[in-house]
Amino acid sequence: MKKVLLLFDSPYLVKRGYDFRKEFSDFDWDAEREVYKALLACGYQVKMLGLYNDISFLLEEIAEFKPDVIFNLVEVFNQKSHLDKNVASVLEMLQIPYTGASPRSLLVCCDKGLTKTILNFHKIKVPQFHTFYRRRKVWLPKRMNSPLIVKPLSDEASRGLSQASLVEDEKGLVERVKFIHESIGDDAIIEEYIEGREFYVSVIGTYRLKVLPLRELTFGKLPEDEPKIATYRAKWDYDYRKRWQLKNIFANDLASDLRKKIEKVCKRAYRVLNMKSYARFDIRVTEEEKIYILEANANPSLDPDDELAESAKKGGIKYKDLIEKIVKFSTKR
Ligand SMILES: Nc1ncnc2c1ncn2[C@@H]1O[C@H](COP(=O)(O)OP(=O)(O)OP(=O)(O)O)[C@@H](O)[C@H]1O
Ligand SMILES: [Mg+2]
């Protein structure tokens, strides 16, 4: 029987062997709990390890349990999200098969500017962008057309994104970049705003890739003059979503030509970014059917209610089978 170590981040320091099943009852832990249950249902011998800031726990656990595969759900180490790649690097150094993105993909995708530079080089459309690092001068680049959207360079889950993220002129731009630098504590990226439909495209596989059924964010009754963007509230505030009837749905009405074009672009993006297990692209498609990649998410959420698992289910892949596939991809690379 294959031994799988389920590795995730813990919000506090606990001893090795700590049983997280109490935490698992909270909805914040949906992904960890459901992956754990799925791994057991697959018949693997499973142990769990929650890391806070002590990497020696991981080394000890591996030495003792000798897992065949590590199911890597680590998103932060010592509360720092950019250190996820360092945890994956340790697994790489120990030469143990692990699920999800490589340290390289985690590094690239954690920087929305770097991701866009690579995609652009490979002639995959991305919005015009410019990066403003902290403690540097901020200005409006001449080549860029308003409106612009100002985002944290590496933060996720739409933190720091609100209707105020959309700016029209240099004054607004400087103010908003300052907000990202000082209040969010991140470098900033500014991008040309792409008007269009917003899709979430999940891709799985190592060499032979599969694009799962597309999801779309629809903006319901959001007033005409409000920018249609997935702000923090639009994603996480249940009442706000209900009031304006924002919905994440399956994109069923797409012409098959356009769907195929989207699938092709996302597969190419997956390949040029050297992704290996599962990923999700956030894209926009304009009325003229130009396809822009807004963001590449390495190791997107595996919460069964989130986009990737929803898309898999629609594509005929049950949650347990999705998790089993992901385990299998890890030993094939
Ligand atoms: N250039 C752009 N043009 C139009 N809308 C944009 C653009 N960039 C971002 N957005 C809007 O803002 C949302 C969040 O942007 P993005 O995906 O880059 O950030 P995120 O915080 O990393 O999100 P995630 O939760 O997917 O990790 C997008 O889903 C989209 O609605
Ligand atoms: Mg996104």
Image: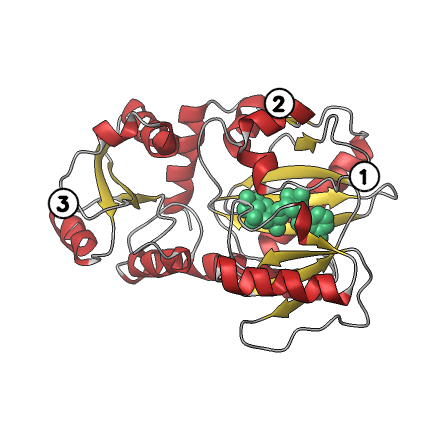
Where does label 1 land, which residue? 225
User: Is residue 38 left or right of 63 when viewed as pictured?
Assistant: right
User: Is residue 172 left or right of 76 when viewed as pictured?
Assistant: right
Q: Quadrant of the N terminus?
A: top left
The answer to whether the residue bearing label 1 lies less than 8 angstroms from the nearest atom of ligand 1 is: no
Q: Which of labels 3 and 2 is toward the front?
A: 2
Q: Which residue appears farthest toward the right when viewing the image?
A: 288
Where does label 3 land, which residue? 16
Name the N-terminal-most of marks 3 and 1: 3
Secondary structure of the residue carrying numbered label 3: loop
Depth check: give the residue in front, 155 or 63: 155
Where does label 2 land, which residue? 242
User: Is residue 174 left or right of 209 when viewed as pictured?
Assistant: right
* Residue 224: percent from left, percent from top: 82, 34
Name the N-terminal-most of marks 2 and 1: 1
Q: What residue type is labelled 3?
A: Arg
Q: CA gap, disc 3 to disc 1? A: 53 Å
Q: Do the residues labelled 2 and 1 touch (CB within 8 Å)?
A: no
Name the N-terminal-most of marks 3 and 2: 3
